[in-house]
Image (cartoon, rainbow, N blue to C red):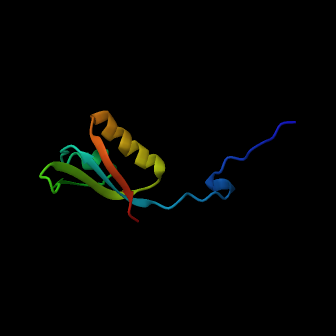
Amino acid sequence: GETNVAIPTPENGAVRPPAATYRIRVAAVLGEEWTDRTQGMAVSVRRSESGGAFTELVGELVDEAALMGVLDALYTHGARLLSVDHIG
């Protein structure tokens, strides 16, 4: 026989995971226009101890799909990923 698997939806009681705050660092210098491309994350250019520049993006994303969208945009742009941290 067939087995039916219920897909979780808000209608059947599924609860969406809470939003989370992430810090993403890339080895590229990105401008403020990336705030729109990264779902409102704050964009700041920093200097490493060795003097090289990197960009730090910090902000709340609604779910992991949103995180993957941001990472995909950075990848498509060619920005080399340094780190992704879940900070809250």
Q: Residue at x 36, y 52 (%)?
A: 84
The residue sitting at the front extreme is: 50
The residue sitting at the right extreme is: 1
Question: Is residue 56 or residue 6 the one in the foreground?
Answer: 56
x and y percentages locating residue 52 in the rendered image: 14, 49
Q: Residue at x 27, y 35 (%)?
A: 78
Question: Is residue 33 or residue 68 the one in the foreground?
Answer: 68
x and y percentages locating residue 64 in the rendered image: 47, 50
Question: Is residue 15 or residue 58 the one in the foreground?
Answer: 58
Seen in the picture, residue 87 relative to 62 is either above or below; the reply is below
Q: Residue at x 30, y 57 (%)?
A: 58
**28 relative position to 16: left or right:** left
Seen in the picture, residue 31 relative to 14 is either above or below; the reply is above
x and y percentages locating residue 86 in the rendered image: 40, 59
x and y percentages locating residue 69 in the rendered image: 40, 43
Question: Is residue 72 or residue 11 the one in the foreground?
Answer: 72
**18 relative position to 86: left or right:** right
**Screen quadrant of the C terminus:** bottom left
Tally the marks.
Answer: 0
**4 relative position to 25: left or right:** right
What is the quadrant of residue 62 in the picture?
bottom left
**15 relative position to 49: left or right:** right
Q: Residue at x 30, y 54 (%)?
A: 41
